[in-house]
Amino acid sequence: MLASGTTVRVKLDWPETRGPCHIRTPHYLRGHEGVVVRHLGDFPNPEALAFRRPAEILPLYHVRFPMGALWPDRHGDNTILVELYETWLEAA
Amino acid sequence: MNILEAPSEKLLAGIRKLLAEKNIATEEEIAERIRITDEASPARGAAMVARAWTDPEYKALMLRDGTMAAEAMGVPMRGLPPLGVLENTAELHNLVVCTLCSCYPRAVLGYPPFWFKSAAYRARAVRDPRAMLVEFGTTIPDDVKLEVVDSTADYRWMVLPRRPAGTEGWSVEQLAALVHEGDMIGVTIPHAP
Amino acid sequence: MHDLGGVSKFMCEAVDAEPHALNDFDRAVDAIRGILGGKKVMGVDELRRNIEAIPEADYLRLSYYQRWIRAITAHLLRQGVITEAELIAAMEAE
């Protein structure tokens, strides 16, 4: 379980290149660092549900990212808050 | 030819016929589902917002547990995704998007609007939101932080906008009438006339 | 292709903020999706995954609910709820 305030990195992984899949981690976050805001609850993994496979129940977090760090051409203090499953997060 | 490339209207007609024959989705069920879906509209969300503006305990509930807050207003939420509520303040403006598809708090706002589902909105909200909001007639001052909330998973999000100035003493009905669909997504800001 | 956050191609495109009311086609497709979901014939994740499988050019060309009916059809065929022969016959009969 990840505590609020933990800095995490979204895994730099591209399952899309390995075959049919269903991923709810936006491409624009992969490899980027954010801060866990809170644990939203535990939900079945949509990556498995999409293929009618047995789905592991995973913790889901709200994670905050600075927008300026995501895009080469933008700066400023906007932030993005995204729901991410624990399997996509690693310690930063 | 790939059958999936058939004209959409023909696909729908064929699917409807088969689903009815197989008793999976009859025309009566479809009509009933449409009727129930039409009951949800931004008026539900607006009523929640107006109540939150006048009732601090309800506001606290709404921010703590949006699903329960919706149910407290008579919105059926069983079996539906959990509802999260994002509070706009003097320092923070929230904007909701679903970049991956079009997840929308349908139970309290009804069908998602065309623009919410558009590629332009989904692409620009997370990369150029302030300029995009100007196109909606909304300017977020530089000293107000903007947080874009991308609905990527199981929750559905709505914004609790700030109560407009000049509405002291207004009834909940009068207040609810000020709150429009876009206000609860964050593309517009409610104001008193 | 569906993963549109920040995609450069759309950054200069104005958002069409016109209301564009839903038509009967849209409402029927939406209703069918809901019924199939309620009966566990097709979950929302299955719907999304089938939408995501639509080739890029078609994805952008099709309307929102046109993408849905295509995804619903693909799912029902793959799951064997309907067969292609049945569907062709049903479409021709209409």
Image: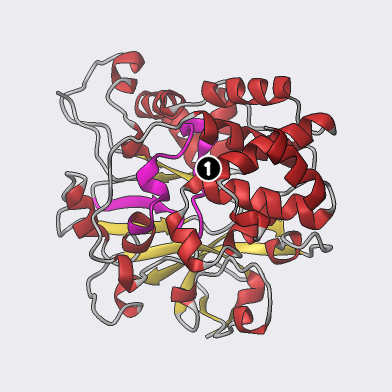
Residue situated furthest front in the rendering: C92
What residue do we see at 57% from left, 82% from top? A11
Inspect this view and state whether residue C1 appears. no
Q: Is residue B58 left or right of residue B182?
A: right
The residue under label 1 is which amino acid type?
Arg
Q: Nearer the viewer, residue B126 or B168?
A: B126
Residue B144, picture quadrant: bottom left
Instruction: In the rendered view, tell whether residue A66 sits above or below residue B5.
Output: below
| x and y, in percent, of residue B85 in the image | 46, 43
Tell me which segment is drawn in magenta: B91-120
Circle 1: is it few (<14), some (14-19), or many (20+) Cα within 10 Å?
some
Report the residue marked by disc 1. Answer: B64
| Location of residue C20 (image quadrant) | top left
Residue at image point 65% right, 59% down: C50
Q: Nearer the viewer, residue A54 or A19?
A: A19
| Residue A19 at x, y percent in the picture | 68, 79
Q: Answer with left or right where residue A13 lies relative to residue A68.
A: right
Q: Position of residue B126 (x, y in %)?
A: 35, 64
Of the 4 image quadrants, the one containing the C terminus of chain C is top right
Query: What residue is drawn where x is 47% and y is 72%?
Result: A35
Element class at badge 1: helix
Q: Is residue B17 left or right of residue C62?
A: right
